[in-house]
Image: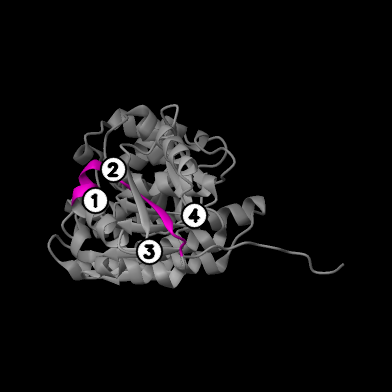
């Protein structure tokens, strides 16, 4: 039988990370050959931080429009779609944090248009990934989208964002370690497709944060540079896998379960980091290393640090397996009991 496998992988063609690189936006657009009519998608705060400047710079060479979004919800995605179709937009630029990038990513995908990612904060690893986290009917869902054709990450801008967001992004990347173990487990137990290349990239990103945790601190721009590069590599790992598998396992299901049980408490990456401590314990791995690294970068290691109660964590652990029932993880198909959840919480001291 002739070989017939086929796989599509989509990567950013250009990645620029560094101090004061925002002024390079026109050169970047020229290198990736965007067309004439562009739309900048930003937020109310990020418009003032960077959106207005990007608009001013790009308007010298392109016909630009600008639009603000408020939340990462389907309503905002549809708003951008309608606007883009109405005036025949040819490319998009996301200037903002995770919500702005996720909304733009999905809208550009649905409009079949390229987009450029210009993060103003680094709160999770979606900067360069082909997946978008969007809320629909009050539930956060991971949706297939497009990878950006380019990333322009100005560390001088990102370093001015609240440090909590960067620490959360680091926690999200560190949680790759348990996601990889879940993926390997799914390969062994369920025969699921597994990519050693994608896993190696995801692990490299996590290890980079762990090895450099001592300089990922408030006010240290080099730490921002290391963290952002790790988040971009994590996103590329998802592109190689053509799924979120190398960066999303039981720890993400735990985070999404908490979104339902106690909405509005903690950032996404913070909850994934806490989840990773417990999932690494279940895998029999070095959960203390994850806990200690989270402490070093200033991310929470206990639920009470982000306003969650013990009962919320226990419940989330027992129902997390239902979040993505088709994604096999260390939680199995039936989940874990309340007694087991209480034991995990007691040993890892996450409450």
The magenta stretch spans residue 42: yes
Alpha-carbon span between mark 1 and mark 3: 19 Å
Quadrant of the rendered image containing residue 227? bottom left
Alpha-carbon span between mark 2 and mark 1: 8 Å
Point out the tag, 4 or 3, that comes first from the N-terminus: 4
Point out the tag, 2 or 1, that comes first from the N-terminus: 1
Point out the tag, 1 or 3, that comes first from the N-terminus: 3
Rendered residue at 45%/27% (across/down): 137
**Residue span colored magenta:** 34-48
Q: Label 3, secondary structure: give it.
A: strand
Residue bearing the label numbered 2: 267
Disc 1 crowd rating (10 Å Cα; few below 14, some 14-19, many 20+) is many
Q: Nearer the viewer, mark 2 or mark 4?
A: 4
Disc 3 crowd rating (10 Å Cα; few below 14, some 14-19, many 20+) is many
Residue bearing the label numbered 3: 151
The residue nearer to you, when weighing 35 against 344, is 35
Residue bearing the label numbered 4: 130
Quadrant of the rendered image containing residue 344? top left
Q: Nearer the viewer, mark 4 or mark 1?
A: 4
């Amino acid at each position: 039988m002739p070989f017939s496998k086929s796989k599509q992988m989509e990567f950013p063609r250009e990645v620029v990370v560094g101090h004061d690189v925002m002024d390079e936006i026109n050169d970047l657009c020229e290198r990736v050959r965007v067309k004439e009519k562009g739309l900048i998608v930003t937020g109310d705060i990020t418009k003032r931080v960077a959106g207005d400047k990007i608009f001013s710079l790009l308007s010298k060479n392109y016909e630009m429009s600008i639009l603000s979004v408020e939340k990462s919800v389907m309503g905002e995605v549809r708003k951008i779609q309608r606007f883009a179709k109405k005036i025949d937009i040819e490319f998009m630029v996301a200037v903002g944090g995770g919500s702005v990038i996720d909304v733009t990513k999905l809208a550009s995908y649905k409009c079949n248009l390229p987009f450029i990612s210009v993060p103003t904060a680094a709160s999770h690893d979606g900067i360069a990934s082909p997946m978008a986290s969007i809320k629909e009917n009050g539930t956060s869902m991971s949706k297939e989208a497009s990878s950006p054709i380019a990333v322009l990450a100005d560390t001088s801008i990102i370093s001015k964002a609240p440090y909590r967001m960067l620490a959360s992004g680091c926690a999200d990347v560190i949680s790759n370690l348990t996601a990889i173990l879940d993926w390997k487990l799914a390969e062994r137990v369920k025969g699921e497709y597994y990519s050693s290349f994608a896993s190696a990239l995801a692990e490299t990103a996590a290890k980079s944060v762990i090895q450099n945790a001592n300089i990922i601190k408030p006010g240290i721009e080099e730490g921002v540079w290391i963290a952002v590069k790790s988040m971009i590599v994590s996103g590329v790992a998802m592109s190689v896998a053509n799924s979120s598998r190398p960066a999303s396992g039981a720890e993400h299901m735990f985070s999404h379960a908490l979104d339902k049980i106690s909405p509005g408490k903690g950032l996404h990456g913070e909850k994934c980091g806490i989840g990773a401590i417990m999932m690494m314990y279940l895998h029999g791995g070095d959960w203390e290393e994850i806990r200690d690294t989270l402490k070093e970068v200033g991310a929470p290691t206990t639920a009470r640090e982000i306003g969650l109660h013990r009962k919320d964590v226990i419940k989330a652990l027992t129902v997390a397996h239902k979040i993505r029932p088709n994604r096999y993880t260390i939680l199995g198909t039936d989940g874990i009991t309340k007694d087991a959840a209480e034991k995990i919480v007691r040993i890892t001291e996450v409450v």
